[in-house]
Amino acid sequence: MNLINLFQGIGTMFYQSPQIVICRIALIFAGFLLVYLGKKEILEPLIMVPMGVGMSAVNAGMLFLDGNKIGNLIIDPLLTSTDDLMKYMQINFLQPVYTLTFSNGLIACLVFMGIGILCDLGYVLDHPFISMTIALFAELGTIATYPIAKLMGLSDGAAAAVSIIGGADGPMVLFASLKLAPEYFVPISIVAYLYLSLTYGGYPYLIRLFIPKELRGKAIKREKPVQQTTSAEKIVFAVIANALLCLLFPVAAPLFLSFFLGIIIREAGISRYVSLVGDGFLYTATFFLGLILGVLCDASTLLNPVVLKLLVLGMLSLLLSGIGGIIGGYVVYFAKGKNFNPTVGIAGVSCVPSTAKVAQKAAQKANASAFILDYALGANICGVITTAILTAIYVTLLS
């Protein structure tokens, strides 16, 4: 009995280069680690648990295909011909999901619709100028990383796509990389989602580094009672903003439509749609997003030399955006006569609602009576809008 043909996951390692074999083994254990970190909620469990399982499975489950080609029966993201695509959609079990929802941006739009369900526009309309000011400063990473990426040798499209990671909005990164750098779509998506989970662990240290404890715990004095924004006002704003942004940036119309439709469904009180989108679409899309990102992490893909550049640039982009948001928090702090908590600035990085929670936790840790969540959520939602606008500008100018 030929053991290499019987146990092909192990057997294929004898026919691959040592580099790929070492990387496969490392990625199997990296998948175990992601599952553990997701279970402990050190990283985002909704993404990391399925991603870790998929990463381990795809690197363990290699086998010999036609013509002694080494591959797997899970997914092949590099198919280009129609004949191959139709063949492997009947063989690889995740190929239909990838082809029909992932590689065309549909899954990104479904997640964006779910994010809209989670967002309350009232926080933006209560503090519009503060929210938008902070969100604009928090785009520092999406703007400043582009010339750095160009200096490191990336193409215009790839430089823009990796810069969008600074917006900390996964669906936006998927959309931008599909439009601008399809050849790097897989590594950019993987890098983006790995790093977005790190905003939980990294940004609290950034806050402590740049904001002293007395400012982190500063309670904001409410000058006057905030007038409650009605659902009708939120719907009017969402409808007009959606139409205006689609008119100005039609290339990103799928994202704007998805996001504002989620908001409008929420405010219209259509409970069945809220349940469908918020529980059905969002969590189904997030599950497959994590799983597919995991199975895309095969060793041959990640050994591409450009991946190291993407890793560095992704981290730099998120770091600069966090710093930019904190600078925006300080700008508002001084503009309001020091009656503001600059910790809100980190929430301008639009990882909804994670960075808003990070801001509130940091403030409450310094002062139990400090409540800044309403300002933070306003900046968070504006961050989604500003990142979508910048993505649209990049795609319009460079595609």
Image (spheres, helix red, strand yellow):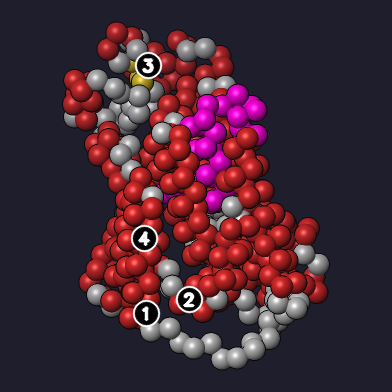
Which badge, 3 or 2, is on the more N-terminal residue? 3
Q: Nearer the viewer, mark 3 or mark 4?
A: 4
Q: Earlier in the sequence, mark 4 or mark 1?
A: 1
Residue labelled with disc 1: 233
Q: Quadrant of residue 333?
A: bottom right
Residue 169 location (% of width, % of height): 49, 52
- Answer above or below: position of 306 versus 367: above
| Identity, as a three-letter code, of the amino acid under mark 4 | Leu
Q: Which residue is mark 2?
A: 125
User: Which range of residues does the magenta coloring cover?
Assistant: 148-172
Mark 1 or mark 2, earlier in chain: 2
Q: Are marks 3 and 2 in contact (CB under 8 Å)?
A: no
Which amino acid, by three-letter code, is at mark 1?
Answer: Glu
Which of marks 2 and 4 precedes in the sequence? 2
For mark 4, what is the residue? 244
- Quick check: marks 1 and 2 in contact, CB under 8 Å? yes
Q: Amino acid at mark 2?
A: Leu
